[in-house]
Image (cartoon, coloured by chain):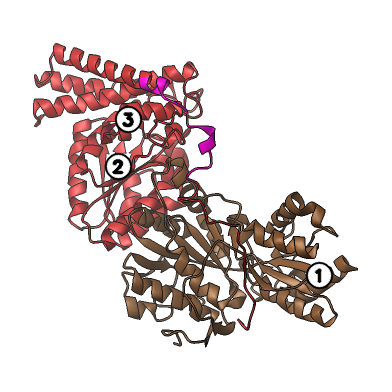
Chain colours: A red, B brown
Amino acid sequence: MTVSMTREQGLELLRQMLRIRRFEERAAELYQLGKIHGFLHLYIGEEAVAVGSVPALTNDEAIVATYREHGHALVRGTSMRSLMAELFGKATGCAGGRGGSMHFFDASRRFYGGLAIVGGGLPVAVGLALADKLQGRARVTACYFGDGAVAEGEFHESLNLAALWKLPVLFLCENNLYAMGTALARHQSQPDIAAKAKAYALTAHTVDGMDVLAVDRATRRAVEFVRQGNGPCFLECRTYRFRAHSMYDAELYRTKEEVNEWKQRDPITTFEQTLRAARLLHDDDWKNLDASIATEVEDAVAFADASPWEPVEDLTKDVYSQPVGDQQSAITQKLTTDR
Amino acid sequence: MAVCVSLDVMTITYREAVRSGMREALQRDARVFLMGEDVGEYGGTYACSKGLLAEFGPERIRDTPLSESTFVGAGIGAALGGMRPIVEVMTVNFSLLALDQIMNNAATLRHMSGGQFSVPLVVRMATGAGRQVAAQHSHSLEGWYAHIPGITVLTPATITDARGMLLTALKQPDPVFIFEHAYLYSMEGPLEEGPVAVEISHAAVRRLGKDVSLLTFGGSVWKALAAAEQLAQEGIDAELVDLRVLRPLDRDTMLTSVRKTHRAIVIDEAWRTGSFAAEISAVIMEQAFYDLDAPVARVCSEEIPIPYPKHLEEAALPSVGKIVQAVRRLLG
């Protein structure tokens, strides 16, 4: 394998993947400790997809992601502190604690969630791209979703509409082979997801989602294609989730052998080996990376733990943008001849 | 196409009023665009957008595929992206296919994001029965939508509201759903003078009376008015409150009326069970119980899928006769 990247680029990709891994490993521990509740869908195993794709976007290009979005937000640059605080449900979280693990938001980075109904983010991404097109802006909206979303009507509707209207959407399918516990081949008559996109006249590619460099290359190409005004592009990243769907499941739907086979292709260890083989990574680098990330994670945990809860008095704040008018003065309007 | 420009009293239809509102919005604000099924070439199922494609072009008057969930969701996205979309869902019946986007995205995004995102989206749709289009095209679900915090639900009953509510809705930072009773589109009436945009915070007393309060909205306003006129001949003086805004509900106007008349009848074209009429009844019970001289009564649809034949459909829906009878019973 030829590696054409600088040492800095390589270390940064490794660092970002490791940040996600350590953030989530710590989150899983904190879940056991009762600091985090509800659903906690870990991205562990899939890090190469977010790390390989998110940096291809400029800062004012939009991201719509799913309930498995910790990695995307971290790579996008939302602070680990505010993400951990969001997991805790604290007021300092990236959504003020209102959303938790599944609903990360960051308006300053055009990160539109954290949308947790499977397939529900695709139409929103199409609309964001429509707004750009109508306002004459040549920028991309990146829309992440899993293989499970492929079964939803919104997937088909959204691909069709984006292609029909030539909207600047990059559809990124994170195919981890399971819609929760149902294998792709058990829910799709045509398990070739890129083929479905092609059926809607989209340009579609499939890439090894365990290979951060492959994802990086494919995404940059796809983003450029979309920015050029060629309409949407579809990228299927073949990846694998190492952990349970959420925090616990008996994993009756897959074998330990299968999981272990995929773990041989762990995107972090394989990339680490690639970097070492290319003499871009040395033992000290690894130690330094690991230590600095451990510090960042512990700082985030301390921050989240020390952060305040949103006051209960604010419970109904932001249901509407502003308090809806005074309802004291009723208007008495004589019904005249309005018919 | 008789669409108003200058505003002396002029007679137009409800559909022309809707069109006039959309035209004005499109002229006034470059961020406004219309999308939905058959809004362009066809001119709108109810002809509300007739002529707009020729005037504003295909970028701003966008025919969509029959993909309700995606074009409503795209409306949400476009609103997030700085536009002011008007999404026309042909009828409330088809809006069920977009319910996920409405309920899980449009209504939640602001609160769930800690106030970071607003969705200034306007969705219009036809609602209601009475045109012999049978069970799947006769729903009245605006009361369902009024269940959802985070959205505003409007039910324009008059020509003035049909035009003006849309304009005010487009100025809101949050999603607004406008339910236009399909029966009203051909209704003619004068467009009242005054500001074009109307307020969308209050109910309106459409007829002053002292004996009983008729509380209703949308298409039923006109049935209730006809009932009130009939009752007047019997010496019964009914007050008619057009709720206009189902969420957030203006409780004061209706409670003021009930406290004055001491009797209330709620008229709602939806099914009685779990209806918006039930909510109104509960509000009166909670806040005006000791002002009542009789239990709150309801005139709603029969609990059946709305049938096709005229005589059965009429029997299923609230009617002038049913309202008159309900008032007589209450005063009896």
Residue on which disc 2 sits: A108
Q: CA distance from mark 3 to mark 1?
A: 69 Å
> What amino acid does circle 3 point to?
Glu
Residue on which disc 1 sits: B211
Quadrant (top left, top right, bottom left, bottom right) of the N terminus of chain B:
bottom left
Residue located 18% across and 43% down the image: A220
- State whether residue B274 is above or below residue B158: above
Q: Is residue A334 left or right of residue B177?
A: right
Q: Is the same chain shared between marks 2 and 1?
A: no
Residue placed most toward the observer, A28 or A175: A28
- State whether residue A238 is above or below residue B210: above
Q: Mark 2 or mark 3, which is nearer to you?
A: 2
Q: Is residue A232 left or right of residue B153?
A: left
> What amino acid does circle 2 point to?
Ser
Chain of residue at mark 3: A
Residue placed most toward the observer, B29 or A49: B29
Q: Determine whether the residue tagged by mark 2 lies in a helix, strand or loop.
A: helix
| Residue B64 appears anywhere in the view | yes
Would you call the spot at circle 1 few (<14 residues within 10 Å), some (14-19), or many (20 or more)? some
Magenta region: A303-318
Residue B322 position by quadrant: bottom right
Residue on which disc 3 sits: A46
Q: Position of residue A189 (x, y in %)?
A: 43, 46
Q: If you read the primary sequence from the N terminus, does the residue marked by circle 2 or circle 3 appear first?
A: 3
Q: Mark 2 or mark 1, which is nearer to you?
A: 1
User: Is B17 inside the magenta-drawn segment?
Assistant: no
Q: Mark 3 or mark 1, which is nearer to you?
A: 1
Q: CA distance from mark 2 to mark 3?
A: 25 Å
Chain of residue at mark 1: B
Chain of residue at mark 2: A
> What amino acid does circle 1 point to?
Asp
Q: CA distance from mark 2 to mark 1?
A: 57 Å
